[in-house]
Image (cartoon, grey):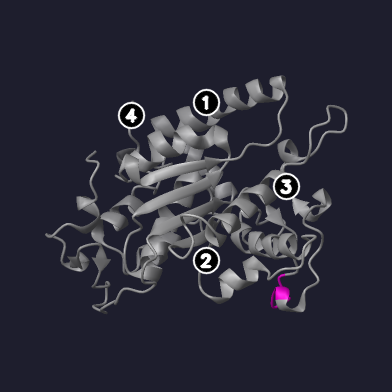
Amino acid sequence: MSTSLEQWFGTDNPLCEHDGDYYRRGRIGRIWAPNYPGVDTLVIVCCHAIFKIDPARPGPAGYSDPDSFDETNWHLSPFQKSNPETGKPGEHETFLAHIAAGLDALAAGSLENKSLLVFSGGPTKPSLTQVSEARSYYHAAYDYEARMPQPRNNRAELLLSEGSLLMEERATDSFQNLLFSILLFRRTTGRLPADVRVITHAFKSRRFLYLHAPAINWPANRIRVHGIDPPMSAPDYEATLAGELKYGYNAWKHDPFGAGEELSRKRIQRGWKDEYIEELGNGQCEFAKTLLRRMVPSTDHVRQQ
């Protein structure tokens, strides 16, 4: 694929009239003026679990969330849990590190005042809760900030209130984390991000940089991965790399859009429904809609290697 963004706009697409990087015309003809002046960077925190919250409560304003540092307050998969016999810590601590990295990115430094932070992850454990990973991460972020030893403004609450923290609540895998977050940035600001920073596990860097980004025709020089791995012993590290190669990188290499049997089955198990495609594509350009449609299970949509 081309490394430009021409297909994202395309002058032959009447639904994607544009002026530079600004997206002017929605599907039903609305004119979207650019919002968030000066904001050109998308920071994505990929969610990997669900922090246990009470969905009936309106949010952290009436703060009574459980301790986000307590492993029992997270819905974790077996491989994410601590193991006292080996000394392996629970991976919820790594998820909090991802959250902190996202908050830090917007608080100071080169991305301050020019970025949107997106927590990306849907309700991936429908048998346990309808709360999305993204919404639970916001509550975890609020709790993380509230428990810091030095009194300060709660950055999670502040970013949410000013519209700089968004929740993408449909993604069920890493490909969807990237694509859906870009679409949310565009829907919110009226333009594509100039740069994308993905905060996730370091061992997943190659799949984002060499598979997901090329699959959606995203330029290689406009995406970077900020990788933070769990603490690992040598055996843990080797097993993790082997598992990522077999079940992650190679699976996506042979099925870039996740439309094949293996990856689509995982999506369904995590609560994905193809009916979400119309919702996600509403108001987006034809190329974005094409990318969304390619996720639908069909032999026509699976790239054979």
Q: Who's the residue at 62% across and 57% down the image?
A: 133
Secondary structure mostly seen in magenta is loop
Residue 59 in the magenta stretch? The answer is: yes
Residue occupied by mark 2: 166
Q: Secondary structure at mark 4?
A: loop
- Estimate the x, y position of residue 62 in percent, counting from the top left: 76, 78
Residue occupied by mark 4: 304
**Disc 3 versus disc 4: nearer the observer:** 3
Give whichever of discs 2 and 3 has the lower sequence position. Answer: 3
Residue 200 in the magenta stretch? The answer is: no
| Relative side of 300 to 87, left or right | left
Q: Amino acid at mark 1?
A: Leu
The outermost residue toward the left is 12
The span shown in magenta is 55-60
**Disc 4 versus disc 2: nearer the observer:** 2
Q: Amino acid at mark 3?
A: His
Q: CA distance from mark 3 to mark 1?
A: 23 Å
Q: Who's the residue at 68% across and 55% down the image?
A: 50
Q: Amino acid at mark 2?
A: Leu
Q: Secondary structure at mark 2?
A: strand
Q: Secondary structure at mark 3?
A: helix
Determine crowd level at label 4: few under 14, some 14-19, many 20+ residues with C-alpha closer than 10 A: few
Residue occupied by mark 3: 92
Q: CA distance from mark 4 to mark 2?
A: 36 Å
Give whichever of discs 2 and 1 has the lower sequence position. Answer: 2
